[in-house]
Image (cartoon, rainbow, N blue to C red):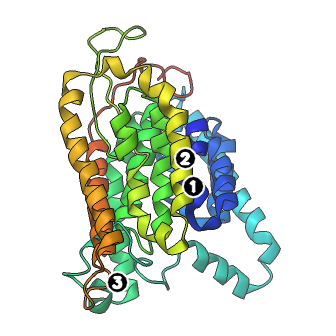
Amino acid sequence: METSLLEHDTFIIDGESGDNETEDGQRVVEVYELMGAGCFVGSFMYKQMSLYFALPFFAFLLGKAVRYSDTWAIATSRVAAIGGAVITVVVLCVLPVASDMESVTALVKRIFPVGRGLYEDKVANIWCSISPAVKLMQLYSKNTLARLCMVSTLALAAPKCIHLVKNPTAKNFLVTLLNCSLAFFLVSYHVHEKSILLPVMPASALLLHYPLVSVLVNTYGFIRLGSVSAGGGCDSVDDKIHIICLPFPPTHSIYPLIKREGSGLYLLAVAVIYLLAVQPLVWSHVDRLGEWSQRATHLLYLSAFGCVVLIGCDLAIPPPARLPDLWTLLITTYSCAHFVVIYLLTLLPDIPSPVCDGVPATGKKRI
């Protein structure tokens, strides 16, 4: 939690740190089913970006209710109670404006902004990256694009959500949050640059669970899966720990937004604070990095070099007059390629933990 709240992009973007931190706090509680369901609904009623986490929450709570109940009757009652909590919170949020249908309609449009564009400004997602070759917004209507985005998002999110229903552990929940929020960012409708903050939060939580990550990962902002020997707590010391970290690709992807708002110096300052905060986690485990992780360092250097070159070009070389957004689009497309790789890595069938995952999230035994 502390790593998530320290995440530097959250404080900088758009001057909305108050909104973002309120949203963070509402998402913190997910252990207790009814409270977690209610807090999550309150979160997306407060700020619709939280819908990026809707499918993982649904899959996690459904999986816990079905797999860790003694009888089907108990499972059904738990699902009904969660549904009741969701409906109650929605009613309480809508009740103040329920007498005015225009306000209710505006609320629905705010949560589901179908009437707006496919994306806002230059975003590091798939639709924006392919826009120079395929002008989707000129070829199709907004309703058609909204349906395309819905199908694409569900298709990308489904594999990990199904896995979470079958294996509703806390670790799988965090990985699915990262996977689905990336799916939403990459192909959902009306994505904003700052929407990348959503995948950052579960990634930060995974950093706390898997702190065996080198300084290069924190510095250069690429995600990698490495392996080291796990000691203690598990059945075998040969179990492998896979590492996920996503602190800095968002910083690169939102660079154009930060540049427009003149907040580059502030971002640099809080990025340094973030690095200093996670240094103890990094250095305490860096000597246990596996051979694969050490070889992957070359890829990290290459990735970081690309980031530096693109930002340097944007700062030093004016774009051609007929291509005013050249550097911005190259930066976002480069970041998008990283996010696609991260998404694919989260599809791995299992990411072992330093401790065994045999105990379900509820602490109850399976039927």
Q: Residues within 10 Å of mark 3 (few under 14, many from 20)?
A: few
Of circles 2 and 3, which is in front?
A: 2
Residue type marked 1: Thr
What amino acid type should be assigned to the residue bearing mark 2? Answer: Glu
Q: Nearest the camera: 353 or 316?
A: 316
Q: Could you tell me how far apart the alpha carbons at marks 2 and 3 are, in whole angstroms?
A: 36 Å
Quarter occupied by the N terminus: top right
Image location of residue 142, percent across then percent down: 39, 86
Instruction: Provide the residue designation for mark 2.
Output: 7
Which is more N-terminal, label 1 or label 3?
1
Q: Check if mark 1's residue and mark 2's residue have beta carbons within 8 Å.
A: yes
What residue is drawn where x is 35% and y is 31%?
214
Is 72 left or right of 298, judged from the image as shown? right
Q: Distance between the residues labelled 1 and 2?
A: 6 Å
Secondary element type, mark 1: helix
Question: What SS does tag 2 mark?
Answer: loop
Q: In this view, does 244 lie above or below 249?
A: above
Residue 73 seen in the current view = no
Q: Which residue lies furthest to the front in this view?
A: 316
Residue type of the residue flagged with mark 3 = Thr
Asked if one can make out residue 182 in the rendered structure from this viewpoint, the answer is: yes
In the shown orientation, is residue 95 left or right of residue 169?
Answer: right
SS for callout 3: helix
- In the rendered view, would you say 84 is above or below 116? above
The residue to which callout 1 is attached is: 10
Q: Which of disc 3 and disc 2 is earlier in sequence? A: 2
Residue 226 appears at what percent x and percent y? 27, 30
Residue occupied by mark 3? 144
Q: Mark 3 against mark 1, which lies toward the viewer?
A: 1
Location of residue 335 in the rendering, given as x and y in whole percent from the top left corner: 31, 60
